[in-house]
Image (cartoon, rainbow, N blue to C red):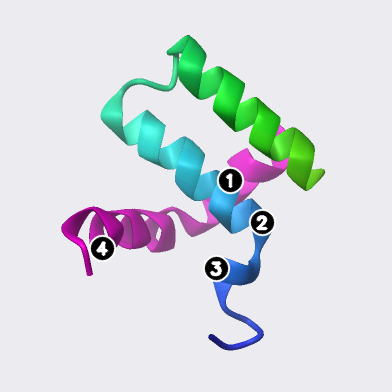
Amino acid sequence: MSVDDPLNDPVFGAAVLKLSFLMKGIADQPGFRVVYFGTIRDLGITDAEVNAYIEEHRSLLENHISKTVAGE
């Protein structure tokens, strides 16, 4: 992994978590909310930061999610 690898960015990880649930249509489930908001709290980032990251890097995130689901 390079220093610029998005996997080292906590906002990237939170964005993957949130977008994964959004893509499955289950982001409104209580379990997601507990995990997601606890994660961003622990990382010291905000939901607004995650949303902005998703907006700016959606194709990168979707590609990462699809590769992860496919087991690559």
Q: Tell me, yes or no, whether the two marked residues, 1 and 2, touch with CB atoms within 8 Å.
A: yes
User: Is 69 placed left or right of 18 in the picture?
Assistant: left
Furthest toward the right, the residue is 44
Cα separation between marks 1 and 2: 6 Å
Cα separation between marks 3 and 4: 14 Å
What is the magenta range? 46-72
Name the element at disc 4.
helix
| First along the sequence among labels 4 and 2 | 2
Q: Which mark is residue 14?
A: 1
**Residue holding disc 3:** 7
Cα separation between marks 1 and 4: 17 Å
Between 69 and 25, the one lying in front of the other is: 69
User: Is 64 placed left or right of 9 in the picture?
Assistant: left
Furthest toward the bottom, the residue is 2
- Quadrant containing the C terminus in the rendered view: bottom left
Kindly identify the residue that appears in the image at 33 percent across and 54 percent down.
65
**Residue holding disc 2:** 10
